[in-house]
Amino acid sequence: MAIFFATLQILGSLGIFLYGMKVMSEGIQRVAGDGMRKVMATMTTNRFTAAFTGLITTILVQSSSATTVMVVSFVNAGLLTLFESIGVIMGANLGTTVTAWIIAAVGKFSLSKIAVPIIGIGLPFFFAGKNRVKSTGEVLIGFGLLFLGLSLLKDAVPDVKSMLNSDNLAIKEQAQAVTAWVQSLSGHGLASRFIFLALGILLTLIVQSSSAAMAITVTLAMNGWIGFEDSAAIVLGENIGTTVTAWLASIGANTNAKRAARAHFLFNVLGVLWIMLVFTWFTQGIDWVSAHLPESLRTAKHSSDIGFSLAIFHSVFNFTNILLLIGFVPLIEKIVIKWVPDTEPNARRPRLKFITQRMLDLGELNIPEAEKAMEEMGNITREMFDGYMKVFQNPDQDLTSSVKAIKELEDAADTLTHDLTEYLVRCSSSELSTKNSQAVARMLRTVSELEEICDAIYRLIKLTQRKYSKKRAFTEDMILAIQEHAAAVSDLIDLYRIKLCQNVSEEELARAIAIEEDTNRHRKQFNKAVMKQMQKDLPVQTGMLSIEMNNHLEQIADHGLHVIQLAYYETHEDQAPEKHGGTA
């Protein structure tokens, strides 16, 4: 029974640690999500700045798994190139070593003494604040819970040395049994290293967090359950185990996203392979460094400095691995390209994939992929409209292939609409910042408007096909009028394509309104003129066909204006018509 309750205490402590990491990471995403996305997009121009970006991002979110999953998402969305992603992944490996230093500090002072005050500071922000202030409170509460969980984990894991010296024979026998089991795995040279390496991989797969696995490993080592070399081998296994998360996230993503996940795996495995060759000398060097630690860093509550030794080992190993392999990023890129060949070279774009990480909610950081997909949908409307104009203006050419291509674009738009809507709904189910919640709501409405535009353009193509198949001859004035109308609609399409994911100024809104009013006036004048012609000598079927075309062009302009209005009112919420009893 005692073992059962001790196990529950360890699991509970680990749960507090993981929940604190989750709350802190998600709060940081809401506070700095836009900044993190901009940094990821702009500070990855070369492998060195990319590695620095990965380092800083992982230190902030306290999870290399979250960073690498984010990288897979950004590569899938086309926001990062494969080359850039490899540098970020390298930096993420170094960033995750901060966790070991925090855990090692448990032995230096009582983290529980500062954990509760930190939670106390964050609580007023969480309840009294709004938006970013509330998220700041979440960061502080999460940080405090993370510290509290580590402190409880340290206390929950019994000290083997004290157990071996216990007067209670049962406790002493338990400690002897555990140490005997560990010793049976040790002392077999290279075989023992691979055994503990495999245990590290297994542990990371079970807890689905390299930070949590590191917390368990360092705590066990500090309390005497495993020695330095054995725990160092477990840490190397955790480096490989953490790559599985990104690998799983890449399932269903595009080819480059799969390659980024494979690059993460390859980088970590190569690191483990070379250090296995020099493992004994490397750990001896770390032992020497640890033995010469300043007195101010010496662990007060333990008989050894193994916690700091593991932190030094983890940091030096990952830093050395970066130094050794950062020059080979182009080669790693070539290897993963051959590893994951292009299977669908003619595919327009992959299906949208909502990237997540089991321990963390990455809703904030999934938004860039949604924006990229929405821009793609805007491009589809442009291509479809250009295709329609080509078909309309060339009645003497056989443009069957063009019509087929437009149909394929319309099908792609339907698929993208379905994917985007489902994706955005999943984003909205996450705890987003107020700004991003509004952005997701706006994108959902925008996607609907873009789908309507695609449908209207495809109906225009069908009407044009009917015109040619039924040999409906338009007069030169009718053709010129439709071309003028289409030119105005084309200007509006160009405007909303640029502004789909950008702020819209008052001047740009005014321009969009002017274009839509112009197309509406044109529709009325054109339809009235056609009605008069039908009363004279114009065939009714021909006249009605031209009126239908004209009406569909006006519909496209209406939906295009709505797209611009949605973008404008997102940053000018006080001017939104619904605020004054109207509709946008």
Image (tube, grey):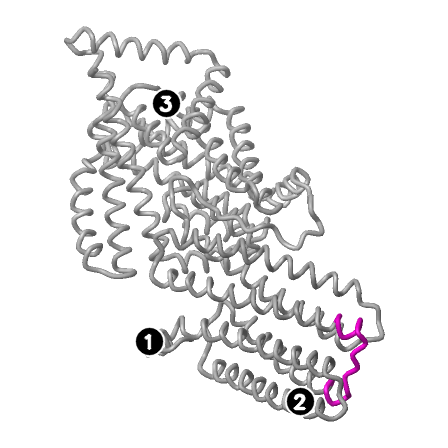
Q: Amino acid at mark 1?
A: Lys
Q: Is residue 477 magenta?
A: yes
Q: Which residue is mark 1?
A: 579
Specify whether 230 is left or right of 494: left
Specify whether 142 is left or right of 352: left
Where 448 falls versus 267 (above or below)? below
Specify whether 103 is left or right of 262: left
Q: Nearer the viewer, residue 406 or 350?
A: 406
Q: Main secondary structure of the magenta part?
A: helix
Of pointers 1 and 2, the one earlier in the residue sequence: 2
The image position of residue 302, as x and y in percent, is 23, 25
Q: Residue at x 73, y 80 (%)?
A: 541
Q: Which residue is mark 2?
A: 531
Q: What range of the chain is rendered magenta?
A: 465-479
Query: What distance separates the C-alpha of mark 1 from that of mark 3?
Result: 65 Å
Where 10 falls versus 247 (above or below)? above
Mark 1 is surrounded, within 10 Å at the Cα level, by few (under 14), some (14 to 19) or many (20 or more) other residues, namely few
Q: Which residue is mark 3?
A: 228
Mark 3 is surrounded, within 10 Å at the Cα level, by few (under 14), some (14 to 19) or many (20 or more) other residues, namely many
Q: Secondary structure at mark 1?
A: helix
Q: Are marks 1 and 2 in contact (CB under 8 Å)?
A: no
Q: Are marks 1 and 3 in contact (CB under 8 Å)?
A: no
Query: What distance separates the C-alpha of mark 3 from that of mark 2?
Result: 91 Å
Of pointers 3 and 2, the one earlier in the residue sequence: 3
Q: Nearer the viewer, mark 3 or mark 2?
A: 2
Q: Secondary structure at mark 2?
A: helix
